Amino acid sequence: MTVAWKDMMLDKVAIGPVSARIYQGADYGKGPPIVLYLHGGAFLDSETNVDRPVAISLAKAGAIVAAVDYSSLSGNLFPKALEVSFSVLSYLANKRAAGLGDRKSLLFVAGEEAGGNVAAGVALKARDQMPDALDGQVLISPLLDPFMGTSSIRKAEAIGMRQRWTEGWSHYLSGGGCHPYAAPCLCSRLSGVAPALIFTAEDDPLHDETLGYGARLKKAGVGVRQHVLPAGTGWPSLYGGKSEGVPDWQEHVSRHFGSFLQDVSDQPQLH
């Protein structure tokens, strides 16, 4: 599916105007799902108006994807980054006012790496403050553990990420304490959050903490679908690192997200 995009300003968001790039597939149907997408960047990047391969992959599955610039307003600091993102989610939940989708549109939050952390925090806050508004969360190698003690992350030096993530965590948490919304892997109450679609890869430094969080969600009774992509699908390029083989993770993300959409639509009891 061909995906088009346009830049726009979400000027009715409660916290203030937020810029966004809206991705939309050419063949999306009636009542298309709406996805709030949060970019990665180790809590350090604030680059705007760039193509987001993950957002494009989600749009290819038939969704309208709002890739928002949560970094400029928040400085990539907790809790401001979460507040900006949650404010946009609240805005998108009112589909008619947002001008995206319609009353039948499902609502999702998605993010990769640092954006996956914020997405997981948004899902927790939505459970607490906006029950039943969020239909699902898509966590793509979420950066969840500030202690970075897993076996897989100790291999991150291979793509030069361990030091960068250390700096990123220090920056992100410098704006406030280590609240469960800031480090969801430390949250003791996970029940009741929206169903999750979780991605990692065999050669992903965040493999262990991603699967660990998925296991905890399952134990809490949350519907979880998780996929471990084979090594060599280009997954490390998600962090700007080098990868061997043909990078084809985008197709995997699009296909599995499409199946997740269908599952949530067909089985509303998952929510």
Image (cartoon, rainbow, N blue to C red):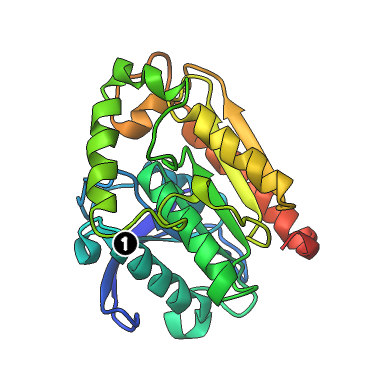
Looking at the rendering, which quadrant does residue 114 occupy?
Answer: top left
Looking at the rendering, which quadrant does residue 135 occupy?
Answer: bottom right
Q: Nearer the viewer, residue 160 or 91?
A: 160
Where disc 1 sits, the SS reads helix
Judge from the rendering whether residue 230 lies leftward or rightward of residue 215; answer left or right.
left
Looking at the rendering, which quadrant does residue 124 occupy?
Answer: bottom right
Q: Residue at x 62, y 33 (%)?
A: 227
Q: Is residue 25 above or below residue 7?
A: above
Q: Residue at x 66, y 39 (%)?
A: 215
Residue 252, visible in the rendered structure: no
Q: Residues within 10 Å of mark 1 (few under 14, many from 20)?
A: many
Q: Residue at x 32, y 32 (%)?
A: 239
For disc 1, the marked residue is 81
Q: Is residue 116 above or below residue 163?
A: below
Image spot of residue 74 (x, y percent): 24, 63
Image spot of residue 11 (x, y percent): 29, 81
Image spot of residue 238 (x, y percent): 37, 33
Disc 1 marks a residue whose amino acid type is Ala
Image spot of residue 133 (x, y percent): 60, 73
Q: Residue at x 36, y 69 (%)?
A: 83
